[in-house]
Image (cartoon, grey):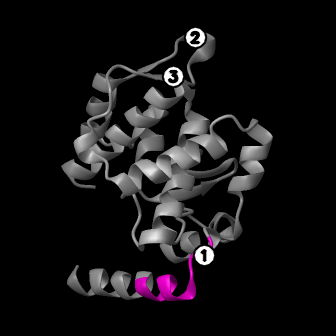
């Protein structure tokens, strides 16, 4: 992830936390996931560049997950950004997150805000069990069954979000171009 990608992810988190007045990180991850796949299905590219992995309780943005959970594999730059902008709960509320400032709207497009607002409304207050079941789509299932790192495929996530066949082809073409340029 580039510096810009990390800053955008930080601003996405702040946007969600400000809209919800604070949230547990489980709901945060799922709001981001559903906003990301909706954006992908509608516009042909993801809203955030973090890679999503299939964990037992559903998809998570892996770089963000590692930083929020305090994993040793955390990206140091993102960790610093999060420490400066997001406060974590203490003791028995360690999973709660609150924004220390407002999101910088220069990093969020109208399409991003539309996808985030919709995901907040649809997922922000869902009980854990319902949100968990909702996030276990076909791509989650495929990725979860694979050996090793359980990385979810962009095309599979777009299909789970009901992207049209034309959009699926567009995404595949762009992925092929990116791979050729890498």
For residue 74, say whether it is visible. no
At 45% from the left and 33% from the top, the residue drawn is: 68
Discs 1, 3 touching: Cβ within 8 Å: no
Q: Earlier in the sequence, mark 3 or mark 2?
A: 3
**Circles 1 and 2: CB atoms closer than 8 Å:** no
Q: Looking at the picture, how far across and down is residue 123, in whole percent?
A: 65, 43
Q: Which mark is residue 168?
A: none
Q: Which residue is mark 1?
A: 159
> Looking at the rendering, in which quadrant would you find the C terminus?
bottom left
Residue position marked by numbered label 3 in the rendering: 21
Front tag of 1 and 3: 3
- Measured from the top left, where is residue 136 in percent x and y? 71, 58
Query: Dot 1: few (<14), some (14–19), or many (≥20) neighbours within 10 Å?
Result: many
Dominant SS in magenta:
helix
As drawn, 3 above or below 157: above
Looking at the rendered image, the quarter that the N terminus falls into is: bottom left
Left or right of 20 on screen, residue 106 = left
Q: Is residue 169 in the magenta section?
A: yes
Asked if residue 54 lies in the magenta stretch, the reply is no
Name the mark nearer the viewer: 3 or 2: 3
Q: Which residue is mark 2?
A: 91
Per the rendered image, the range of residues in magenta is 162-170
Is label 1 in a helix, a strand or a loop?
A: helix
Indicate the position of residue 164 as horizontal and vertical percent values.
57, 82
């Amino acid at each position: 992830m580039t510096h810009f990608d990390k800053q955008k992810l930080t601003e996405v988190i702040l946007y969600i936390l400000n809209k919800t007045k604070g949230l547990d990180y489980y709901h945060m991850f799922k709001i981001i996931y559903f906003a990301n796949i909706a954006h992908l299905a509608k516009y042909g590219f993801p809203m955030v560049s973090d890679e999503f992995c299939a964990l037992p309780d559903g998809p998570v943005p892996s770089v963000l997950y590692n930083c929020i959970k305090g994993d040793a594999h955390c990206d140091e730059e993102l960790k610093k950004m999060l420490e400066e902008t997001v406060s974590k709960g203490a003791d028995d509320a360690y999973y709660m997150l609150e924004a220390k400032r407002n999101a910088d709207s220069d990093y969020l497009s109208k399409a991003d805000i539309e996808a985030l607002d919709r995901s907040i409304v649809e997922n922000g207050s869902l009980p854990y069990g319902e949100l968990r079941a909702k996030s276990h789509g076909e791509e989650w299932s495929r990725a979860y069954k694979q050996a090793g790192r359980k990385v979810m495929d962009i095309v599979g996530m777009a299909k789970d979000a009901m992207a049209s066949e034309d959009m699926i082809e567009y995404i595949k073409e762009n992925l092929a171009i990116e791979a050729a340029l890498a």
